[in-house]
Image (cartoon, grey):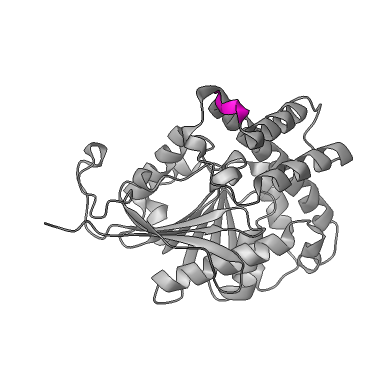
Amino acid sequence: MGCQDEPLVQKVWELYEQISSLESLKPSKDVNMIFTKLVLTCTPPNPIDVTKLCKKVQEMRSKLIRLCGEAEGHLESHYSTILGSYENPLDHLNIFPYYSNYLKLSLLEFNILSQHYTHVPSKIAFVGSGPLPLTSIVLASKHLTNTTFHNYDIDPLANSQAIGLFSSDSDLSKRMFFHTNDIMNVTNDLKDYEVVFLAALVGMDKEDKVKVVDHLAKYMAPGALLMLRSAHGARAFLYPVIDPRDLRGFEFLSVFHPTDEIINSVVIARKYAMPTHSLEKGLGLIILPNKCAEIQAFNHFNQGNMIEELAIEDKLS
């Protein structure tokens, strides 16, 4: 039996073909309808493991993630332009259709961060902030009200749009900084940040994601936290999956898999305080992140059901 026989895969494949046939992925009635169907198809909890699907489906998934990323970029740019036309753009964030999801995701990420960091970070970097940096906005305005945020994006237009959202806000305009740069070209500056957020679509395939993580491991400060967005089950047709085993140079702490309307899983890891050696050979890993304890879904911070996986130490015989 081929792996395309799975009903979920068949449905996703049909939607992929429809999306591929669109002339443009910019917001429109047709684009919005098809992507809404895709999200509704992939959001319900599903035990499917996308890494075990056949090569043909894997290739489709890779292409679909890139299409989703392109559409997401167009959507954010579209709404950033609209928001920029207001006198006070940040007062109208609720026009963005997924704003409530960002409120919940940012609260979840703040609570997870608080569990692993004993004091309020003074400087945070967000890599892949885009034209509508909602995570930075929500964290800075609601949860980390004295922290400065350094937002990195490779696209100068995206940063230009984002900067325009803050000009009328006397507080955030002083705490939001934007850098147009490929994060792979950022080196010593990464040591300044106590926490680095890595957007889900920075490194849209496994090889690129691993390269970015390895670069961050090389230059982030010892003990600094890395927060990444991943995906679980059928949601992995929408976003790349972070394999904890690929977090070389980091201690894998935990991953939360939401089962509500929050699509992204949240992974948190800590840069080793002691230098690691021969990471390419797998040496220097203190915790083996492939050995995880999974506990049942539960309500966490009143943000819907989650599945938590905690890294556990190898028991020495």
For the stretch drawn in magenta, the main secondary structure is: helix
- Magenta range: 1-5
Q: Outermost residue toward the front? A: 1
Q: Outermost residue toward the left? A: 317
Say which residue appears at 70% left-offset and 34% top-offset.
11
- Looking at the picture, tell me which residue is in the foreground, 169 or 195: 195
Q: Give residue 219's position: percent from left, percent from top.
A: 35, 50
Residue 257 lies left or right of residue 253; in this view the side is: right
Residue 46 lies left or right of residue 40; in this view the side is: left
**In this rendering, is residue 21 above or below 133?**
above
Where is the C terminus found, in terms of image quarters?
A: bottom left
Say which residue appears at 25% left-offset and 42% top-offset.
279
Say which residue appears at 67% left-offset and 38% top-offset.
68
Residue 142 lies left or right of residue 298; in this view the side is: right
**In this rendering, is residue 285 above or below 20?**
below
Q: Is residue 222 magenta?
A: no
The quadrant in which residue 101 appears is bottom right
Q: Give residue 121's position: percent from left, percent from top.
A: 45, 71
Where is the N terminus found, in terms of image quarters?
A: top right
Say which residue appears at 77% left-offset and 63% top-offset.
93
Q: Outermost residue toward the right? A: 29
- Looking at the picture, tell me which residue is in the foreground, 152 or 60: 60
**In this rendering, is residue 90 above or below 73?**
below
Q: Is residue 4 magenta?
A: yes
